[in-house]
Amino acid sequence: MPRIYHKCHFCGGKVLERRIIVDYRWGDELIAVIKNVPAGVCQICGEQYFKAEIVKEMEKLVHSKEKPKKTIHVPLRELTVV
C-alpha cells in the first residue's frame, strides 16, 4: 500500500513516494549511505519527507552490528573562510 504524503510545506507542490539514496548522519562521527529508502519527494522543489517508521528503520540499520554491504572512503574538507 503506498504511503500518503501532504503537500510540500515549502512550495505547496505535490509530494510522491520515490526510492532514494540517503546520506544519514549521526553526530560528528557517523555517516552512512542508505540505498532504496522510501521517501516523499516534492515534484516541484525536491524537498524530501520521511515517515516515522522509515526513520526508525534507518536508525536501526546504521546502529546495527551487521556488516555493511560496502565501505567507501569519504574525504573530509574544512572551509576556512573568515
Image (cartoon, helix red, strand yellow):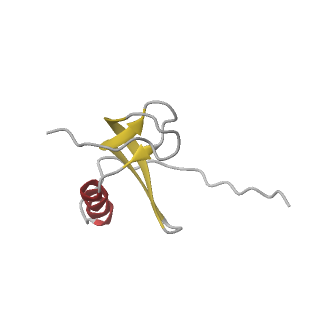
List x then y, in percent, for residue 46. Answer: 48, 36
Q: For the view shown, which residue lies furthest in the right direction?
A: 82
List x then y, in percent, for residue 2. Answer: 19, 38
Q: Residue at x 50, y 67 (%)?
A: 29
Instruction: Give the quadrant of residue 8.
Output: top left
Seen in the picture, residue 30 relative to 32 is either above or below; the reply is: below
Q: For the view shown, which residue lies furthest in the top direction?
A: 43
Q: Residue at x 25, y 66 (%)?
A: 65
List x then y, in percent, for residue 80. Answer: 80, 58
Q: Residue at x 25, y 42 (%)?
A: 4
Q: Name the quadrant of the C terminus.
A: bottom right
Q: Residue at x 43, y 44 (%)?
A: 48
In this rendering, position of residue 69 left or right of residue 12: left
Q: How many marks?
A: 0
List x then y, in percent, for residue 52. Answer: 29, 58
Seen in the picture, residue 29 relative to 24 is either above or below; the reply is: below
In this rendering, position of residue 5 left or right of residue 47: left
- In front here: 53 or 45? 45
- In front here: 74 or 31? 31
Q: Name the quadrant of the N terminus.
A: top left
